[in-house]
Amino acid sequence: MPKQHYKKFLDECVQEELDTIVNNRILEVYVKTIKQIIEESPLLFVKALMCIDKKINPSSMRPYEQQALIVCASQFVEGKKKVQYLDDSVYELFDEIINNGTKRILELSDDGDETNDKELN
């Protein structure tokens, strides 16, 4: 019986490793594609992000939405030498995990009343 237990555990480990490899390959394709899009047209890339965030369908965009999109995207791209696409808090969390590991991450509950410790490892 213990033999079957180890086989099941090994199968789960192999599956997890394969999932990680596949996800990393997909991520690599996404990163290359996004980099290529940014190089070809950073302005269109920022407009696309804004459309996603604001839930704007480019094919049914109203003239005032189009104007706001053009002005905001232009100022964002032209106003920055180093463009950052995510909020600073995302990068702060990333740096904290890099520096301190994932052993303990504090998560605020949905209602904000309580802080819970979560074990990730």
Image: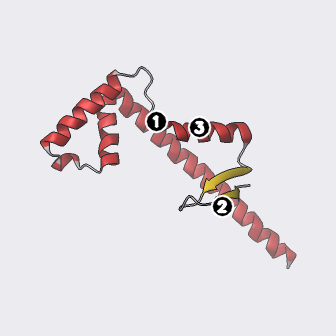
Badge 2 crowding class, 10 Å Cα cut-off, few under 14, some 14 to 19, many 20 or more, is few
Q: How far is mark 2 from mark 3, CA to CA?
A: 32 Å
**Most distant residue in the left direction:** 63
* Residue 62, image x, y percentages: 14, 45
Query: In screen coordinates, is 20 left or right of 120?
Result: left
Q: Which residue is mark 3?
A: 92
Query: In screen coordinates, is 16 left or right of 54?
Result: right
Name which of mark 3 and mark 1 comes first in the sequence: 1
Quarter of the image with the C terminus in it? bottom right
Secondary structure at badge 2 equals helix
Tell which tag, 3 or 1, sits nearer the viewer.
Answer: 3
Amino acid tagged 1:
Lys
Q: How far is mark 3 from mark 1, CA to CA?
A: 24 Å
**Numbered mark located on residue 32 in the image:** 1
- Vertically, is 96 above or below 59? above
Amino acid tagged 3:
Glu
Q: Which residue is mark 2?
A: 15
- Vertically, is 41 above or below 105? above
Residue at position x 51%, y 36% in the image = 88
Secondary structure at badge 3 equals helix
